Amino acid sequence: MSVTLPDPLARFFAAENSGDADGLGACFADHAVVRDEGQTFEGVAAIKQWMRDAKKKYQYTAEPTGVAQRDGKTIVTATIAGNFPGSPLSLDHVFGIAANRIVSLEIG
């Protein structure tokens, strides 16, 4: 299924799937916050390290399968496949976007 995403989110998933931490970091505002697996990562350096660690641990890919708008946020549903129990699974990525940059992301 082909999903059309806003530019910063298309760049996010492309960087995430290629393991490009610098490209991923460029999608985020300086003081962005990511919440994933019960942890919070603040700032671009921490977010880049989060992606590196997750890639190393799970060797995953993320394929967007749906997109919706709700309460000022963009929710992207993606199929995540990798080296973890229950793979593949569907997760919602709830993005806050401002000035063409991601300011928040909650994965769950």
Image (tube, rainbow, N blue to C red):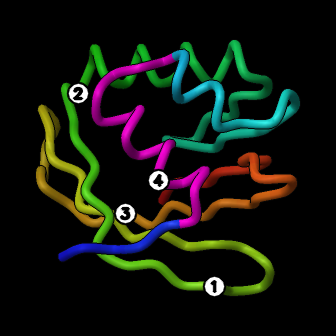
Name the secondary structure under disc 1: strand
The image's mark for residue 41 is none
C-alpha distance separating marks 1 and 2: 29 Å
Which residue carries the number 4 mark? Answer: 10
In the picture of the structure, the residue carrying the numbered disc 3 is 91
Q: Secondary structure at mark 4?
A: helix
State whether residue 74 is above or below residue 41: below
Residue 95 in the image, given as x and y percentages of width and height = 65, 60
Look at label 1 and name its amino acid.
Gln
Whole-angstrom CA distance, mark 2 to mark 3, is 15 Å
Above/below status of 23 relative to 99: above
| Mark 3 vs 1: CB contact within 8 A | no
Question: Reading the chain from its start, which is encountered first: label 1 or label 2?
Answer: 2
Q: Secondary structure at mark 2?
A: helix
Residue 39 falls within the magenta-colored stretch: no
Q: From mark 2 to mark 4, how far is it between C-alphas?
A: 21 Å
Pair 4/1: label in front:
4
> Tag 1 or tag 4, which sits nearer the N-term?
4
Instruction: Place residue 91 in its image quadrant.
Output: bottom left
Crowd around label 4: few <14 · some 14–19 · many ≥20 (10 Å) = some
Counting residues from the start of the chain, the first of labels 2 and 4 encountered is 4
Could you classify mark 1 by the number of other residues whose Cα lies within 10 Å: few (under 14), some (14-19), or many (20 or more)? few
Looking at marks 3 and 1 on the same chain, the residue that comes earlier in the sequence is marked by 1
Image spot of residue 106 (x, y percent): 61, 54
Q: Which mark is residue 58?
A: 2
Q: CA distance from mark 3 to mark 4?
A: 16 Å
- The residues colored magenta run 6-21
Q: How far apart are the two marked residues, 3 and 1, measured between alpha carbons? A: 16 Å
- State yes or no: discs 2 and 3 in contact (Cβ < 8 Å): no
Checking the image for residue 69, the label placed there is 1
Q: Within the magenta stretch, is there residue 19?
A: yes
